[in-house]
Image: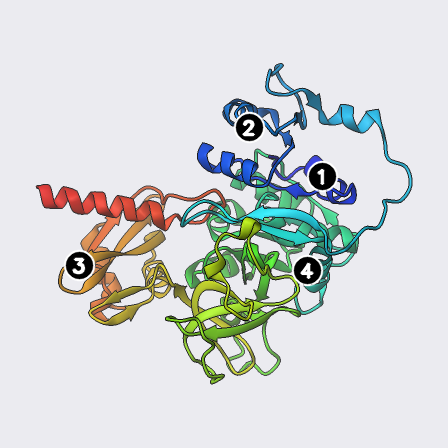
Amino acid sequence: MCANTYEHLLLYFAVPCAGLVLNTVSHRLSAEHLAHVLDDADVRVVFIEPSLLERAGPVLRALDRVGHVVVVGDPGPPSSDADLRFEDLLDADPHVGDFAEGDETRAAVICYTSGTTGLPKGVVYSHRSLVLHALMVLQADSLGITEGDVVLPIVPMFHANAWGLPYASVFAGADLVLPGAAHGPLLLVDLIERYQVSVTACVATIWRDMLPHARGRDLSRIRRALTGGAPLSPSLAREWLEECGVRLNNTWGMTELAPSGSIARVRKDAADGSPSEALLLPGTPNALVRLRVGDLVDGEPLTRRSGAIGEIQVSGPTTASAYLGGVGAERFTPDGWLRTGDLGSLGPYGDLTITDRLKDVIKSGGEWISTIDLENALMENPDVAEAAVIGMPHERWDERPLAFVVPRPGTTLQPQAVRQDLLTRVVSWWVPDEVIVTSHLPRNGTGKISKADLRVLGRKATDRRTNQ
C-alpha cells in the first residue's frame, strides 16, 4: 500500500525475484474492498506508508493471516499496527549475487479490478506475461521508450502496474521520476518541466486538472502524453495542443490485459492528415493482442466484416484467461476470449473504436444513445469543464439520459442553457431531459468517474421530484 515511490519500485522487482507474489493494493479502497482484496489474495506481509496506517489498521488487525506489517518511508509516530521498518529489512540481510531463475509461468503479481460492479476480482500476472508486456510497449510504434527518455508515471503504481511503465522504463534504462504521495496538479507540472519529462501517463481527469498550471510552461520535451481509463474528449485534447503544444495520446487497456491493449497512432496513409484526431481513438492493438467483435446476446463472434458493432473481445499471452479463485467465469467465452464489456467495432486495419461500455449505453425508445458521444458533445460547450451521462429508467421510453456537468472556474451554468447548446451538436432526442450542475463528479479508487455513484445521485434526484 504505497504511492509512486522509490521503495515501491524496489518492491516491484524484489518480491517477484524472491519467488513471492506482489499484490499492489489501492489505498483508496473502502474498508470492505480492502479486507476482501487482502483476504482473497492470502496476503501475509503488508508494506504500507505510515500515513495510511490509521485508516487501514483496523482491517489489518482483523486478518489473522497477515503476519507482518512493514512501514515504508518516514515512520512518523510509533504505531501498534506495524512491527517492522522497510529500511531495517534492507540493512539486515542485503542480497548478493543473482536471483535463482524459476518457472516463468509462475505467478509474479496480482492486480485487482476496480470493483465497479461488485467485489474486486484478482488478475494474476506471470513472470512471462510481465516480460512480454514490457517488450510489447517498448516497441517503437507503441511507446518506444529508450535509455534517453525521462518517464513520469502519474497513474498509480497500485493500478495495473502503472500501465507497465516502471517495468518498461527499467528494462530500457530510462530515468524514472516518481512523484510520491503528495502530487497535486501544480507539483506534477513542476516535475515535468524541471526534469524535462518525455513520457508521462495519467487518466483524463488529471490532464484536466494540470491544464491551468501548464500554460506558459516549458513542456517541449514531452513526446508521449498518454491518457486512458476513460475516453479522451476532443475539447481537452484541443486545449492541450493549442495552449501548451502537447498532443495527448489515447490508449485502451484493462487490468485483465496486464494492462495495455492498444495505443492511438497516426497511420502513414492517414487521409485527413490530422494527427490530433487520430490520437483521440483507442488505436491499433499492440503486438500480441488479438481483438474481435462478439454478439451482445450470446457472446459468439460476429462475422469478420469491418465496422460490425458488438462486444469487444480480446486474447493473447498477456491477457488473463481466468480470475483468481475462478470467480467471474461468465466474462470468458467458451474458446477462452475475455469479454471486455466494451461496445465497439474494428476497422479494416484492426483499428479499435469504442462506442460505450455495455453497462452504460442507453436504449431510449428502441434506439441506442452513446454516453461517450453525448459527454463529448457536452464538453464542447466552452463553459463545461467535465460531463458525465447515465441512463435513468423512463416509463415511456425505457431509458432517458441524465447529464451531470461541472462548470469551468469563473463561469455559471444554467441547465436549460446547456440543453440549448447541446441541440446545436446532437439530434434532439439525445438531449437529456434534465441536466444537473455540480461542483465535482464522484470518482472511484483509480480516478475514473463512478457511474455507480451517479446512478445513486440520479435516483435521489428523481425521488425528490416525485415527492415535491
Q: Is mark 4 on a helix, strand or loop?
A: helix
Q: Compared with residue 334, is residue 126 higher up or lower down, i.e. above or below?
A: above
Mark 1 / mark 2, whichever is N-terminal: 1
* Image coords of residue 319 (percent x, y): 60, 62
C-beta proximity under 8 Å, tags 3 and 4:
no
Q: How far apart are marks 4 and 1 (CA)?
A: 19 Å
Q: Nearer the viewer, mark 1 or mark 2?
A: 2
Q: How far apart are marks 3 and 2 (CA)?
A: 45 Å
Does any portion of residue 196 appear in the rendered image?
Answer: no
C-beta proximity under 8 Å, tags 2 and 4:
no
Q: How far apart are marks 3 and 4 (CA)?
A: 45 Å
**Image check: 5 left or right of 245?**
right
**Image check: 260 left or right of 306?**
right
Other-residue count near label 2 (Cα within 10 Å), few / some / many at <14 / 14–19 / ≥20: some
Q: Which residue position is annotated with label 3? A: 394
Mark 3 / mark 4, whichever is N-terminal: 4
Q: Quadrant of residue 41?
A: top right
Other-residue count near label 4 (Cα within 10 Å), few / some / many at <14 / 14–19 / ≥20: many
Q: In which quarter of the image is residue 77?
A: top right
Judging depth in this view, the residue of 304 and 237 nearest the camera is 304
**Image check: 164 left or right of 327?**
right
Q: Is mark 2 on a helix, strand or loop?
A: loop
* Image coords of residue 111 (percent x, y): 59, 47
Q: Which residue position is annotated with label 2? A: 63
Mark 4 / mark 1, whichever is N-terminal: 1
Q: Distance between the residues labelled 2 and 4?
A: 33 Å
Tally of numbered tags = 4
Amino acid carrying mark 4 in the image: His
Q: Which residue position is annotated with label 1? A: 11
